[in-house]
């Protein structure tokens, strides 16, 4: 009996019988090292068009084990960093299928319960700037991004038990613009959750690490502007200002570039980020003690 014996019970809306048979064939071929590479490529191309690919992958025999084997197989190429473009493309096809499983409502909880995201963390630890490593990090971040995009409490609860925040902060500081954008989006989604905000503001060390990296990013963005990245950075600051202790600290450490006209040109067509920025400045001004001349007094 081979892998997709239960495939017929899964709805694959919009597929002809020939297409469906082909999907089943490729899923079966994942179990064999000889046919796996092509099957990974073909299935990763179809992941957008086959709405129930995730349950088909998750419930077929040996498929997730095969995808994890693809990931573990390249661990030796991480340190020392010898990853080739071919290796990177192949494992990223496997990661694309895992992202599909992470995104789907029927498979997400099981995906988290199996702690599968932890298999990706060694990739997020890498620092090599070569294209294969950058692609690997970006695709790995995409899997975590797909999880947080769902706004599910269980996702945030899971991530807070792992080292995802320091990993994202490191990429936010030194990754490519695209990787920085996805990493900042992940941090933003964690902050937008009440549990995540409380976690980051629970200790001065956690808050100060986040504030320091965000501050460095603002400085960098003032030299090399990116409207998309700036949007996520501003949203992170605005959310931090919802916490009273963080708000007090931000009054002292919010970068001047967010208070003056440094980003006026970058944001001229972005009404949402301009509104967030105005709200952030307002939040930090409210509740401040001032002397009769209107000068803010330092906190006692």
Image: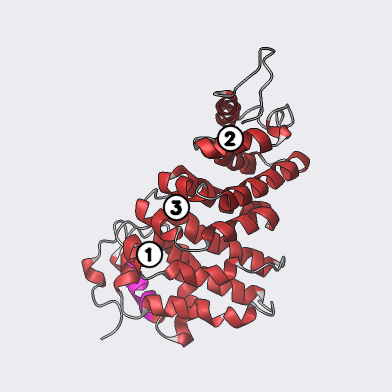
Crowding around mark 1 (Cα neighbors within 10 Å: few <14, some 14 to 19, many 20+) is some
Relative side of 6 to 19, left or right: left
Residue 170 to residue 274: above or below: below
* Quadrant that contains the N terminus: bottom left
Q: Position of residue 176 (x, y in %)?
A: 68, 56
Residue 248, numbered label: 2
Where is residue 253 shown, x and y percent of the image?
67, 38
Spot occupied by residue 287 in the image (x, y as percentages of width and height)? 54, 24
2 vs 3, front mark? 2
Q: Which residues are magenta?
A: 19-28
Location of residue 61 by image quarter: bottom left
User: Which residue lies under the disc numbered 3?
Assistant: 148
Which one is earlier in the sequence, the residue at label 2 or at label 3?
Answer: 3
Occupied quadrant, residue 215: top right
Q: Of the two numbered discs 1 and 2 on the same chain, state the one appearing first in sequence.
A: 1
Distance in Å between CA atoms under marks 1 and 3: 12 Å
Q: Residues within 10 Å of mark 3 (few under 14, many from 20)?
A: many
Q: Residue at x 72, y 27 (%)?
A: 260
Residue drawn where x is 61% and y is 42% of the image: 233
The CA span between labels 2 and 3 is 28 Å
Residue 27: say if magenta.
Answer: yes
Whole-percent x and y of residue 68?
A: 45, 77
The residue tagged 1 is 112
Screen quadrant of the C terminus: top right
């Amino acid at each position: 009996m081979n892998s997709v014996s239960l495939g017929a019970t899964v709805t694959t809306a919009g597929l002809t019988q020939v297409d469906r048979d082909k999907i089943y064939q490729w899923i079966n071929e994942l179990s064999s090292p000889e046919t796996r590479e092509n099957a990974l490529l073909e299935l990763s191309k179809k992941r957008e068009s086959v709405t129930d690919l995730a349950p088909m992958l998750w419930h077929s025999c040996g498929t997730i084990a095969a995808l994890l084997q693809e990931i573990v197989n390249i661990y030796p190429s991480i340190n020392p960093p010898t990853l080739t473009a071919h290796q990177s493309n192949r494992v990223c096809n496997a990661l694309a299928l895992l992202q599909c499983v992470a995104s789907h409502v029927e498979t997400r909880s099981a995906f988290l319960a199996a702690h599968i995201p932890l298999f990706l963390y060694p990739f997020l630890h890498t620092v090599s700037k070569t294209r294969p490593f950058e692609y690997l990090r970006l695709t790995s971040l995409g899997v975590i991004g797909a999880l947080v995009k769902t706004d599910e409490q269980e996702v945030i609860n899971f991530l807070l038990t792992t080292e995802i925040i320091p990993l994202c902060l490191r990429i936010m500081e030194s990754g490519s613009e695209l990787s920085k954008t996805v990493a900042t989006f992940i941090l933003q989604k964690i902050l937008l959750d009440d549990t995540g905000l409380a976690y980051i503001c629970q200790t001065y060390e956690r808050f100060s690490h986040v504030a320091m990296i965000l501050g460095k990013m603002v400085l960098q963005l003032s030299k090399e502007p990116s409207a998309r990245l700036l949007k996520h950075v501003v949203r992170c600051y605005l959310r931090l200002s919802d916490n009273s202790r963080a708000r007090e600290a931000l009054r002292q450490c919010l970068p001047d570039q967010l208070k003056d006209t440094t980003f006026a040109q970058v944001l001229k067509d972005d009404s949402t980020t301009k509104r967030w920025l105005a709200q952030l400045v307002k939040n930090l001004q409210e509740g401040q003690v001032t002397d009769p001349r209107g000068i803010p007094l330092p906190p006692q």
